[in-house]
Image (cartoon, helix red, strand yellow):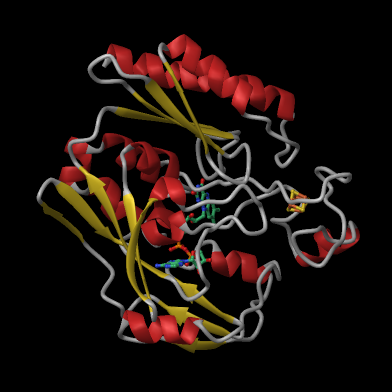
Amino acid sequence: MLPLPTFEYAAPTTVLEASRLLGTPGSRLVAGGTDLLVSMKHRLFEPRLLVSTRRLGLRGVSVADGVLSVGAGTTLREVARHPTVLEHLPSLAAACRTVATPTIQGMATLGGNLMLDTRCLYYNQPAGWRASLGYCLKREGTVCHVAPKGRGCYAAHSADTVPALWLLGAEAEFVSVRGVRRIPVSSMYHDDGMAWLRLEPDDVLTAVHVPLAGRAVGHRKLRTRQAIDYALVLVAVRAPVDGGLWSAVVSSVSPSPIFVEAATPADLAEAAFRACQPLSTHLPAATWRKKMVRVEVARAAAALTSA
Ligand SMILES: Cc1cc2nc3c(=O)[nH]c(=O)nc-3n(C[C@H](O)[C@H](O)[C@H](O)COP(=O)(O)OP(=O)(O)OC[C@H]3O[C@@H](n4cnc5c(N)ncnc54)[C@H](O)[C@@H]3O)c2cc1C
Ligand code: SF4
């Protein structure tokens, strides 16, 4: 069993106090801890202070003026089982149900999912494993084992709920000592595996707002086993209305999800295939994963057409 590093713990009761604590170097927010604590055991992060979201009152789902608002501290299980989500946003419910296992969904939060670290075969490993390769560019090393001649990190965006939330037109609400702001989920991410969030360290995600009148969205997750595994290719597809375009967001193939549009499902699948250039951040061959982008987009669009 891997031990956790030593850290201090704070459980503030206001978001502003949490933001203030996060402003000091070496601090990190923890919600369900299902990703962060594993990463700490792997010595990917060794925060001096963990700031808990538990007492911030960020848990719960409400509906007002045609918008569903989910507190960032709401568990994926609660989101997936909420009657309004099941009736109006089935792709969000489906995405929550594909994360890890039912037990983990009972602890993992929606906020933690949107803020999930990018992942890579050579990075999400215990410290001894990484040391045997001389670590990698993302932490402690100087070389990227995926693209040794490259200069960046290509660790893959792997948060299951993001593609569906993106196409549903969701907005994320952040609070910090600088104030409150809402940004579209589609604007939250950079194409950089080491700095994938367009945010400041003291930004606290407080809620996710999703319009209920959104168009039909489908979600598909390709993975090695149909339980526990992270995605090899993650896809959300949105059907057009009034002669508009089909849209897709593909994730787990690059540091930021990739958005494409096209006039027909076949063109959409082809556009996604062309836009996605997965690298060897996962065990199965990148060339096969690229081909599966086309297959999964086509399957998601077909499911929407036949619904
Ligand atoms: C075995 C296993 C399998 C998994 N499989 C999947 C999977 O298939 N798909 C998937 O998407 N995830 C998977 N996960 C990862 C994780 O369970 C989920 O992403 C989960 O939703 C993370 O939420 P959390 O509350 O546990 O986040 P935490 O681990 O507490 O935090 C994750 C990150 O988010 C930040 N954070 C948390 N809340 C906030 C907030 N309110 N504001 C700002 N920052 C915040 C933390 O600082 C941290 O950097 C898996 C985890 C395990 C252990
Ligand atoms: S893509 Fe390269 S730098 Fe990034 S985590 Fe993987 S091996 Fe490390």
101 to 303, vertically: above or below: below
79 relative to 256 in the view: left or right: left
Q: Which residue is at a point 32% across and 52% down the rendered structure image?
A: 171
Closer to the camera in the image, 93 or 56: 56
Among the 4 quarters of the image, the one containing residue 281: top right
- Residue 268: x %, y % from top left: 48, 17
Total labels: the figure holds 0
Which of 245 and 51 lies nearest the eye of the viewer?
A: 245
* Figure check: 82 above or below 71: above
Expressed as whole percent of the image width and height from the top left, the position of residue 49 reads 55, 85
**Quadrant location, the C terminus:** top left
In-image side of 130 versus 114 (left or right):
right
Determine whether 270 is above or below 282 in the image: above
Task: Tell me, yes or no, if residue 292 can be seen here.
Answer: no
> Percent from the top left, x then y, of residue 182?
32, 59
Quarter of the picture containing the N terminus is: bottom right
| Quarter residue 53 falls in | bottom left
Query: Which residue is located at x 63 percent, y 65 percent?
Result: 39
Q: Visible in this render: residue 278?
A: yes
Q: Is residue 54 above or below residue 147?
A: below
Residue positioned 55% across, 46% down in the render: 158
In this view, the residue farthest toward the left is 65
273 left or right of 305 in image: right
Left/right of residue 177 with respect to residue 252 in the rendered view:
left
Residue 32 rendering spot, x and y as whole percentages: 43, 67
